[in-house]
Image: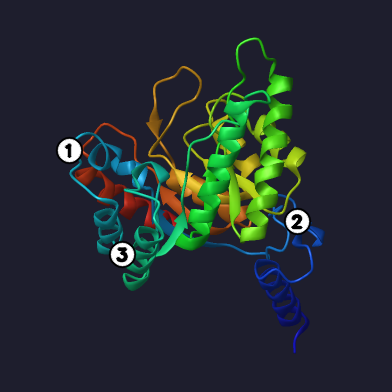
Amino acid sequence: MQRRDFIRSTVAAASLGGLLGVEGNIANAEPAAVPGASRIAGRVDGSGLQLSLAAYSFRRELSGKQPTMTLEGFVDYCAEQDLQATELTEYYFRDKSPEYICALRRRAYVNGLAISGSPLGNDFCHPPGPARDKQIAHVKAWIDVVALLGSQTIRVFAGKAKKGSSEAEALKLAIAGLKEVSEYAGRKGVLLAIENHGGITSTAKQLLALVKGVDSPWLGVNLDTGNFHTDVYASIEKAAPYAVAVQVKVHIREGKKPAEEADFKRIAAILKSAGYRGYVALEYEAKEDALKAIPRYLDRLREALA
């Protein structure tokens, strides 16, 4: 057996062992030493990008008093667009019953789709007390759901500093909360992905301070390319080596300047250079009708990722 093949098989076995509860910690694996390469322990050098679509792209159709689309219909739409995966956001689940969750999992599978992620909303910047306990319990409950769903990752938020609280205090609270739920997620074989989502994750520096503060093999970055507003592409480049999930917006905005079309090819090049292996989900938020615009943007993103 060639040494490269041996290393790959060893890494794969170690990763599988961790998922199945076998002793061993993938956090002990050496990260890639190549400048700009992946900082995710256990990830083999190289890149492999697969296309997904975020359910949030159809937020108007999936929510409201009279939704015009169901989550099942969204899964079918992803298959019709010949995607590799579908991203199912918590907000649009009809219920959390095992029967419903398993039906969604089956629907994705028979349509040849992986479930690339299942984002939820949370806030870990609450001080100790009932509000904080509720947030942590909510995330743990969703981890249980996602483990049954067969999703790859859960997008989580850090939260925002509360009135009278400093950024340093908010960061400390967020790290403590993320440590607790990351430990729980690891026992379920689910990766958590912290998103750059304003507040204490507005910049790449803030985001990576959180990731390094938690220091868990079960927490990485959910890189949202539309949520950095200072040195956008440089920030994407800094965060990309830590990414375990990626959401691509069709626009970027630098500071207070008007929004402009995102450079999909540049983003894809950054991800490949960082050694990212995983799903890239289009998250459409522009004003044009989603049903008309999304196929066009999917084609552009597909071409960029090739």
Mark 2 or mark 1, earlier in chain? 2
Instruction: Check residue 82 in the rendering and tell me which mark sits there, or answer none.
Output: 3
**Could you tell me which residue is drawn at 67 percent across and 48 percent down?**
182
Say if 148 sits above or below 140 in the image.
below
Q: Which residue is mark 2?
A: 34
Q: Is residue 202 visible?
A: no
10 Å crowding of disc 2: few (<14), some (14-19), many (20+): few
**Could you tell me which residue is drawn at 65 percent across and 67 percent down?**
19
In this rendering, position of residue 288 left or right of residue 184:
left
**Could you tell me which residue is drawn at 74 percent across and 51 percent down?**
35
Which residue is more in the foreground, 69 or 129? 129
Q: Nearer the viewer, mark 1 or mark 3?
A: 1
Say if 48 sits above or below 205 in the image.
below
> In the figure, residue 44 lies in which quadrant?
bottom right
The amino acid sitting under disc 1 is: Gln
**Could you tell me which residue is drawn at 55 percent across and 51 percent down?**
143
Which residue is more in the foreground, 272 or 12? 12
Mark 1 or mark 3, earlier in chain? 1
Question: Is label 1 in a helix, a strand or a loop?
Answer: loop
The N terminus is located in which quarter?
Answer: bottom right
Question: Is label 2 in a helix, a strand or a loop?
Answer: loop
The amino acid sitting under disc 3 is: Asp
Say if 177 sits above or below 264 in the image.
above
The C terminus is located in which quarter?
Answer: bottom left
Instruction: Check residue 66 in the rendering and tell me which mark sits there, or answer none.
Output: 1
Q: Give the Cα distance between marks 2 and 1.
A: 51 Å
10 Å crowding of disc 3: few (<14), some (14-19), many (20+): some
Image location of residue 192, percent across then percent down = 60, 49
The amino acid sitting under disc 2 is: Val
Question: Does the residue at mark 2 contact the one at mark 3 (Cβ under 8 Å)?
Answer: no
